[in-house]
Every structure is written in structure tokens, then in C-alpha cells.
Image (cartoon, rainbow, N blue to C red):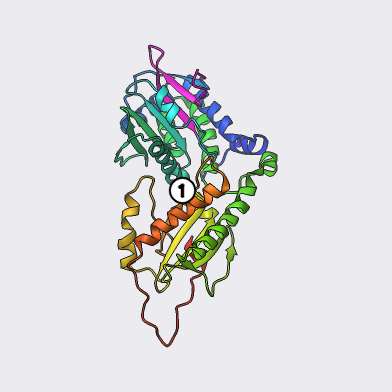
Amino acid sequence: MTDSLFAHLALTFGSHPENLATEALGYILRTSPGARAGVADLLRDVGCSVPDELRWVNQVGGEDGARPDLVGLDGGGKQAVLMEAKFWAGLTDKQPLVYLERVSPGGALVVVGPAGRSTLLWAELRKRLVEARKAMEERPISSHAANVGVVDGKLMVLVSWRALMAAALIRAEGDGEAAIAADIAQLQGLCDRMDSEAFIPVTGEELTDHRFRRIVEFCDIVDTVTGRLVEDGLASTKGFKATSGKGHYLRYMRLNGVVGASLLCDVRKWMKFGSTPMWLTIHGPNWKPTAEVEHLLAPLALELPRRLFTTADGLPTVPIFVAVGKERHEVEQHAIEQVVHVAKRLAGLVAPPATDAGEPAVPDPQATE
């Protein structure tokens, strides 16, 4: 990982490093023919139809209320490429749908983000398209570690800061733009820092933001959902206690009275796999992964948004999505319905035969991140 003076200053004095990075990227693209050509080459490599020369402008507003970070205008002034730069901020309510509507026919929406966040970002982008009943054809891309999809004849691309900066730097250096190459290296230092696991300085805004209360509320919802499942006879928690640890709170249970499972609020899974804090991990009838469980749950991996992931120790885990814009009782009911859906898929499993050793020990939840 590289670092830079710009990275140090941006993280020390800037409460929104994304805004500083976006402004710096816009400056580089406006002043450097080499950087513009490098970014255009990268976009063409992933399937974008990019004009030979784009004029890049920061923060272009419109009647739709959207304000993309960067817009690439073609010779006729049409918005051929909309670029949205992310570090760790969430998507706005206008992304990606309103942005895709604004892109001119044949154009592209390009989302730039940390490589470590690509799985989460792409999952959220796809989820929003599914919710809006928009079809997307995904295109396999081997280069640049990019994700590419086609929506209504327009491209939606997710590419890493690292790939974008590398493309700009190679062409700038090749064209002898030493000063711009140094500027790109400065911005690259900030992007590398944001893409790493290094500690990012805390801002006053973070400490006064009341969204942290949601974590406690999600833990309460885990309790409520577990209680409702027990009341309805779909789960048993006999012999199990609530468990908590670094970044998680969970309730062990037996679904259908047979299948070992845990319902949890897990911040690490939220960061790693997708845009929900709640998860249902299936441990199996004997608290160990089985081929039968994997077979019964396999169709969930093909759903959009994806409904099946695997933990570090090989356990299938299902995201329990949170209903947006709903009252708490509706959020709880939506979560219950998702757990019931999984339980029905596992209804054919039977309890393993009893042994003198008794039931295997419940696994350590910290090992299932």
C-alpha cells in the first residue's frame, strides 16, 4: 500500500474524503490528455462506447434532482458517461436508476469504489434494479476486476479506484506528463488508504450520527423474530442462550425442531457480503455442514439479489433483507417470512441418530464470519 501527503491531509482535515477525491479526479481528467485517454481505454476495455474526446465536468445537476460526481460530455454536449465515486458512503436513493435514465442512449454509468467493497456495491446495485423490475444482462469481464451489466441498452459498470488510477497513470507517464503523473500518484495514495484495512480517522459527524442506534434495534429485531418463530412452532431455542461478540449478536435455534441454525445481526457479514445486517446461518442437523443442506439451499444462490453465501468455515448463510421505509412490525414480519422460506426448503431433513456422546457442541460464532 502506498500513502501520500494528499491522503494524509484529506483524512486529517476533510470530513468527506470522497468529495476531495472526486474533485481531484475531475481536475486530472480536465488537465491531462494522457489521463483522459487512459480512462477512456479502460472504459472501452470493459465494453463502453466512449467517444474519442470527452469533456469532464464535476457535479452536473438536473431536473431529476441527481448530481453525479463526474459527467463525461461528448462533442454534442450529451451526457455519455456518468461517474459516481465511492469510498464507503452508501448509495443515494437516486442511484443507479435515476442516473441510468439520464445517461444518453448507448452511454454508461460508471461507479468507482474500493476493490474490497466491490461485492457489496454490486449486490446493492443489482438489488435496486430487481426492486424496480429492471432487467440487467451481466457481461463476464476478465480484465480490470470490473463488473458490467446492460440495462435498457445502457451499461452499468463497477470498477475499482486502483484500476482507474492505474489506467490514468500509465498513459500520463507514457505521454511524458510528469507533473500530472505526480498528481495521480498523490490521489492514488488516498485511494489505496481507503481501500486498505488501515484505521481511518474518526470525524465529529460520525460521533454525532444517530444511525448507530440501528445496530441495537436490529439486535432487538433478532430477539423478536426468534421469539415469534418459537411461538409459531417453527423453531426451538431450548438449551440455547443469546450470544454476542465482536460485531455480532445471535440466537441459536433448531429450525423445524431439527436443523441447527443461528439468526444474527452481524456487522462483519454486512460489510463483506451485502447490504443487510441480519443473517440466517444454517449449521445442519448435527451442527456441521452437510451436502444435503447445500443441495436444498443451492437455488437461493441463483436468485437476484443473491440469497446464499458461505462463511469462512463453509456454512451456508442467507441474508435476511430489511424492508425499507416500513414500520418496525412490518420489518419483523418481512424477516420472519424470509426465515420461514428457508425453513420450508429444509423441511425434509431428519434428526441424526442419537449417540452416546450426545449432540455435538454448538460452534463458536466468531469462527463463522
Q: Which residues are magenta?
A: 61-85
Q: Secondary structure at mark 1?
A: loop
**Residue 172 visible from this viewpoint:** no
Residue 80 inside the magenta-drawn segment: yes
User: Quick one: label 1, few (<14), some, or many (20+) residues within 10 Å?
Assistant: many
Q: Residue furthest top?
A: 76
The residue singled out by tag 1 in the image is 274
Q: Is residue 113 above or below residue 155?
A: below
Could you tell me which residue is drawn at 34 percent across and 30 percent down?
A: 155
Q: Position of residue 314 (x, y in %)?
A: 39, 64
Is 227 above or below relative to 212?
below
Q: Is residue 178 magenta?
A: no
Q: Residue at x 50, y 18 (%)?
A: 62
Q: Is residue 329 left or right of residue 137?
A: right
The outermost residue toward the front is: 232
- Which image quarter: residue 298? bottom left
Q: Which residue is pictured at 35% across the width and 60% down the height?
A: 345
